[in-house]
Image (cartoon, helix red, strand yellow):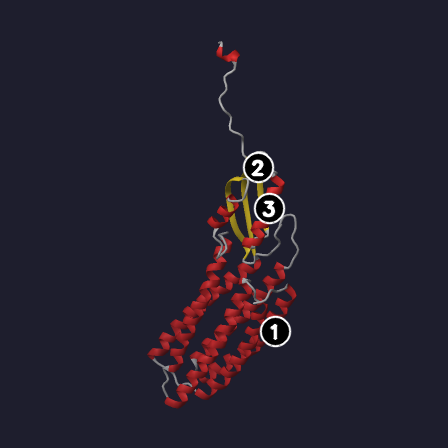
Amino acid sequence: MHGFGGGGSLRSLGIALALNAVYTVVEVVIGFSTGSLALLADAGHNLSDVAALAVAAGAVWLASRPATPNRSFGFKRAEVLAALLNAVSLVVIAILIFVEAARRFQSPPHVTGGWLIGVATLGLLINAVGAAFVFRRGGRDLNLRASFIHLAGDAIGSFGVVIAGVVIITTGWRYADPLFSIVLGALILASSWTVLRNSVLVLLEAAPPGMDVTEIGRALAAHPGVVEVHDLHVWAITPEFPSLAAHVLVQPGNDCHETRVELEKLLRDRFEIDHTTLQVDHKAAERLLSITAHAAGR
């Protein structure tokens, strides 16, 4: 995915939000009139998309606000919080779909397959367009990734509803409706896991996925003149904003400033870590026991 800017992200989210808001109203009305759980489940997911996209857009706006002395990183983690909220909402929606599908399996209602196919085809197109806009701006941003999962899940869900409609028309098998609802719920649950996990890891200030802190420490310690590296911390403000802090000891006589510049370059070139705080000091010289003539004569 490409990188993104706040303005482009807001435009992409705004387009997806408008399309989904209109489609959700249509889908709810027709879902109730036809009695289709698959259609209502898809509408419920779309309704969550509207809220999720609104939260995501708000988070993008907050994250673009300038930093202040008391908020030195600004509101960058607003997007991580939005991603966590959206991931949790996906899990809740999946559970609700499972519960309702179980009830429908016991007594499957009559569903009009033609309506299913028509409305779901429209939903497939709308969600595919929205997902494409968000995907284009995504990058490593968890907030936009969560929004993309909402939209892509809806697109695939709509495709499943189309299949359910075809099965109902051709075979009259009414269990196809709740069955594809369960498939959609499982898809939503599975796709939300990565965003949920990565959001929690960022908030817990764990090392970003794919970064081996031990390897980073060894690379620093192996640099010429470095004696010891300790208090090494690697975390992420956001997934695209990794940070590092460490205390480095160098041999007496080495230029601390020059060593720090070299280590910063190593971290930037090899590990793609630009935001670093390195405290570089000389290793204390070992003091040998010495006995003066005056002390020996006592």
Asked which secondary structure carries label 2, the reply is strand
Q: Amino acid at mark 3?
A: Glu
Question: Quarter of the image holding residue 66?
Answer: bottom right
Which sits earlier in the primary sequence, circle 1 or circle 2? 1
Which sits earlier in the primary sequence, circle 3 or circle 2? 3
What is the CA distance from the residue labelled 3 to the residue labelled 2?
14 Å
Asked which secondary structure carries label 1, the reply is helix
Counting other residues with Cα less than 10 Å from the Cα at mark 3, is it few (<14), some (14-19), or many (20 or more)? Answer: some
Q: Amino acid at mark 2?
A: Asp
Q: Residue at x 47, y 61 (%)?
A: 196
Q: Is residue 54 above or below residue 170?
A: above
Q: Residue at x 57, y 37 (%)?
A: 281
Residue placed most toward the observer, 1 or 143: 1
Label 3 with label 1: CB-CB less than 8 Å: no
Residue placed most toward the observer, 288 or 88: 288
Residue placed most toward the observer, 156 or 42: 156
Q: Amino acid at mark 1?
A: Ile
What is the CA distance from the residue labelled 1 to the residue labelled 2?
53 Å
Q: Residue at x 47, y 67 (%)?
A: 90
Residue that carries the numbered disc 1 in the rendered image:
15
The spot of residue 178 in percent (x, y) is: 39, 78
Which sits earlier in the primary sequence, circle 3 or circle 1? 1
The spot of residue 49 in percent (x, y) is: 53, 71
* Left or right of 6 in this view: 23: left
Residue that carries the numbered disc 3 in the rendered image:
262
Where, quadrant-wise, is the N terminus in this rendering? bottom right
Residue that carries the numbered disc 2 in the rendered image:
281
Q: Which label sits in the foreground, 1 or 2?
A: 2
Counting other residues with Cα less than 10 Å from the Cα at mark 2, is it few (<14), some (14-19), or many (20 or more)? Answer: some
